[in-house]
Image: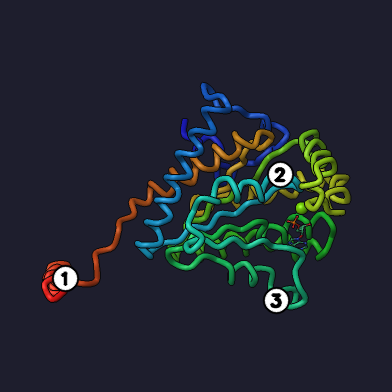
Amino acid sequence: MSYVKKFQVEPGARIQLDKIDADFKPKGLDRDEAEERIRELTVELRDLQHLMYAEDQRSLLIVLQGRDAAGKDGTIRHVFGPMNPQGTRVTSFKVPSKEEQAHDFLWRCHKAAPKRGMVGIFNRSHYEDVLVVRVHDLVPKKIWSKRFDHINAFERLLADKGTIVLKFYLHIDRDEQLERFKKRMNNPKKNWKISDADYTERPYWDAYTEAFEDALSKCSTDIAPWFVVPANRKWARNLVIAEIVADTMKGLNMRFPEPEVDIEEIRRKYHEAERAG
Ligand code: AMP
Ligand code: MG
């Protein structure tokens, strides 16, 4: 079964995260083999991105969500790092600024959506507005509960413009999160990543589970599917995401555009120039 099918949330299906194994290992592939495959895939992804940029017809939006330490930053580095920076744009969504708060919740995300030819990566996204906002009652339920429809309409708008939308929930379990916090604490090169939020959010684990399950269930559509990616093992996570993105991009049957100039004419001019020296 392709990874697209295996990990995609069926539109309308009710997701239960505790039924999904965060420890998943691909069958018949050990870690070294998987890492070799990831290297191949990142080369493929780089070429596909180049083609998307050259074709300049469609764009790709990758949405990364997950709990603290789920591996959003690592995914960007390992899976999308080899792409050409000229054709990609990463946007990390933080606590909204005053300016952002004065607008509707989609405003900052719409501004960051990838234009034709580009790959856009959202490190967190408009989904924060039905996750952290819901868990901490930052706005009343009356407001956030309407946002699922707004999100689906927004993503449809992007799709109608030619944007492919792929959304990944990086699924780690409680023990793995604590293990990663420990590494952040004990490795001086990781200390900077620790935030108070890591610890203040952990007691809300179950409330987040409920919020994620709702978002994944209500907003996985044919044009903007959610994927639940088992992410306790970083290499398995990278493999699954790289396979799904490569598969999807290959399916677009993109073509290099016809040159805007007459190549025969250019050839003639070139030979003239060559003769003239
Ligand atoms: P990080 O991704 O670790 O840099 O943290 C960014 C922080 O911003 C996280 O704690 C998010 O929950 C928070 N954040 C992002 N978007 C929103 C939002 N719309 N409302 C409130 N907090 C947000
Ligand atoms: Mg963080």
- Image location of residue 251, percent across then percent down: 38, 47
- Image location of residue 103, percent across then percent down: 70, 76
Marks 2 & 3, CB-CB < 8 Å contact: no
Residue appearing at x 58%, y 27% in the figure:
31
Q: CA distance from mark 3 to mark 1?
A: 54 Å
Q: Amino acid at mark 1?
A: Tyr
Q: Amino acid at mark 3?
A: His
Quadrant assignment for the C terminus: bottom left
Q: Amino acid at mark 2?
A: Ala
* Residue identified by numbered label 3: 103
Q: Earlier in the sequence, mark 1 or mark 2?
A: 2
Q: Residues within 10 Å of mark 3 (few under 14, many from 20)?
A: few
Marks 1 & 2, CB-CB < 8 Å contact: no
Residue 235 vs residue 174, the one in the foreground: 235
Residue 87 vs residue 187, the one in the foreground: 187
- Image location of residue 246, percent across then percent down: 45, 45
The reply to whether the residue tagged 3 has its Cβ within 8 angstroms of ligand 1 is: no
Q: Using residue 53 as the reference point, say whether residue 210 is left or right of it.
A: right
Tell me the mark number nearer the camera, choosing from 1 and 2: 1
Residue appearing at x 48%, y 68% in the figure:
115
- Residue 7 placement: quadrant: top right
Q: Circle 3 — which element?
A: loop
Q: Using residue 150 as the reference point, say whether residue 193 is left or right of it.
A: right
Tell me the mark number nearer the camera, choosing from 2 and 3: 2
* Residue identified by numbered label 1: 270
Q: Circle 2 — which element?
A: loop
Tell me the mark number nearer the camera, choosing from 3 and 1: 1
- Residue 206 placement: quadrant: top right
* Residue identified by numbered label 2: 70
